Amino acid sequence: MIHYLHREQNIPGTLNDVWDFFCDPLNLNTITPGDMNFEIVAGGDEKMYEGQMIEYRVDFVRGVHTLWLTEITHVRDREYFVDEQRIGPYRLWHHEHIFGAMAGGVKMTDKISYVLPCGFLGDIVHDFWVGRRLQQIFDFRQKRITELFGSME
């Protein structure tokens, strides 16, 4: 089963500043929960570009390191970029990061489509753990982005 996560956040600041922050892979460390022990292993030393491969080490389960290789498959400057998993914990991971200028700031939208391995067993694990964990991760990101850029309220 394909699962979806959709998040939107209005961020004060210029499109250039917001875009530059999110196109720097090293900033993922700043917006990822500390208990995930997130680490870029290779490929994150340049601003995102189409075809870029970025390898991470991350703990989805405390103390269990997982390698995750993503490819930046599409980039349209100051509009969107897409990362797709090539090797990792999901059977499918497709994450669209969309940016648009708005009055007083930038509207950022995350659209994620993902499939867990193991068929119906993966869907059961999703309902009891993975879906909730992804919500927590993106709640953390939203909070950190607000701390870094401020709030539009």
Image (cartoon, helix red, strand yellow):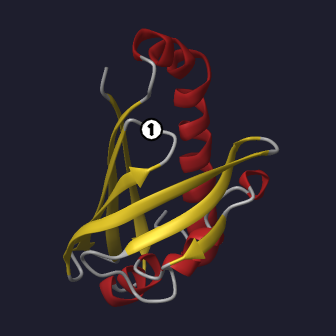
**Taking the image as drawn, is residue 146 in sight?**
no
Residue 66 location (% of width, % of height): 64, 49
Residue at horizontal 57 percent and vertical 80 percent from the top: 26
Q: Residue at x 40, y 15 (%)?
A: 119
Residue 38 in the image: above or below residue 134: below
**How far across and down, in percent of the image, does residue 107 sit?**
31, 65
Q: Residue at x 56, y 67 (%)?
A: 145
Q: Is residue 126 found left or right of 83 in the rendered image?
A: right
78 relative position to 142: left or right: left
Q: Is residue 79 left or right of residue 25?
A: left
| Residue 96 showing in the rendered view | yes
- Locate residue 27, reporting x and y percent: 57, 77
Q: How many marks?
A: 1
Q: Splitting the image into 4 quarters, where does residue 50 fall? A: bottom left
106 vs 24, nearest the viewer: 24
- Which residue is labeled 1 in the image? 90
Give the quarter of the image for residue 29: bottom right
Residue at left 37%, top 54%? 86
Q: Element under label 1?
A: loop
Under mark 1, the amino acid is Tyr
Q: Is residue 100 above or below residue 116?
A: below
Residue 5 vertical position relative to residue 42 in the rendered view, above or below: above
33 vs 36, nearest the viewer: 36
Relative image position of residue 125 (x, y in whole percent): 56, 18
Q: Residues within 10 Å of mark 1 (few under 14, many from 20)?
A: some
Classify residue 102 as left or right of residue 106.
left
Closer to the camera in the image, 105 or 31? 31
Placement of 125 over or under 77, stated as above or below: above
